[in-house]
Amino acid sequence: MPRIPITARLSIDESELTESFARASGAGGQNVNKVETMVQLRFDARNSPSLPEPVRERLIRLAGHRATAAGEVVITAQQFRTQARNREDALERLLELIREAAAAPPPKRRPTRPTLGSKKRRLEGKSQRGVTKRLRGKPAAD
């Protein structure tokens, strides 16, 4: 089976994808009632041999409501009036989701302490603000 490239190192087999078709809602005139243009693309992420474990976990988490309890990612496309365009759209959206999951998460932020200079500037600003507020009061009686 041909493989679908996702990144330079990652690709999935076409046989891992299943498509089903249904009648779409929305625009299409008389065509909408008789032609099955909506595409439902399913990818079993949990059992896919093509995906490394960390990518698999991130994909299921990123998919959110599009992932089933069994770990299947379901993409529904019905934006276009032709089945072919909806198939392309569904596949591209799935590949984009997998690309996003394949990207390594950014490293966690290492907490740092404020520098001595920033502490001094902060306290100087606070005392200046206090002086400004004190000057707003009534003048002292002599």
Image (spheres, rainbow, N blue to C red):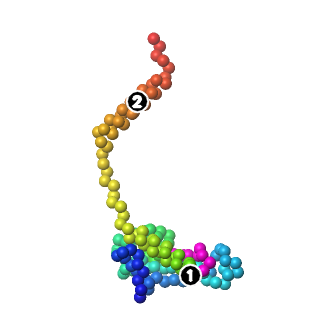
Residue drawn at (44%, 68%) of the image: 62
Residue segment shown in magenta: 75-82
Q: Position of residue 39 (x, y in %)?
A: 55, 80
- Residue tagged 1: 84
Residue at the far left: name it: 116
Instruction: Please tell me which residue is depicted at 70% across the width and 78% down the height of the picture.
Output: 29
| Identity of the residue drawn at 60% across and 80% down | 82
Identity of the residue furthest to the bottom in this view: 1
- Percent coordinates x, y for residue 138 in the rendering: 50, 20
Image quarter (top left, top right, bottom left or bottom right) of the C terminus: top left
Count residues near mark 1 (Cα–Cα under 10 Å), then give few for <14, some for 14-19, many for 20+.
few
Q: Nearer the viewer, mark 2 or mark 1?
A: 1
| Labels 2 and 1 touching (C-beta < 8 A) | no
For the residues labelled 2 and 1, the Cα–Cα distance comes to: 68 Å
Q: Position of residue 11 (x, y in %)?
A: 39, 79
What kind of residue is marked 1? Answer: Ala
| Magenta-colored stretch includes residue 66 | no
Q: Give x and y (percent) for residue 131.
A: 42, 26
Q: How many marks?
A: 2
In the rendered image, is residue 69 in sight? no
1 left or right, relative to 33: left
Residue 128, which numbered label? 2
Characterize the magenta stretch by its predominant secondary structure: loop
Which of the 4 quarters of the picture holds residue 118?
Answer: top left
Closer-to-camera residue (69/11): 11
- The amino acid sitting under disc 2 is Gln
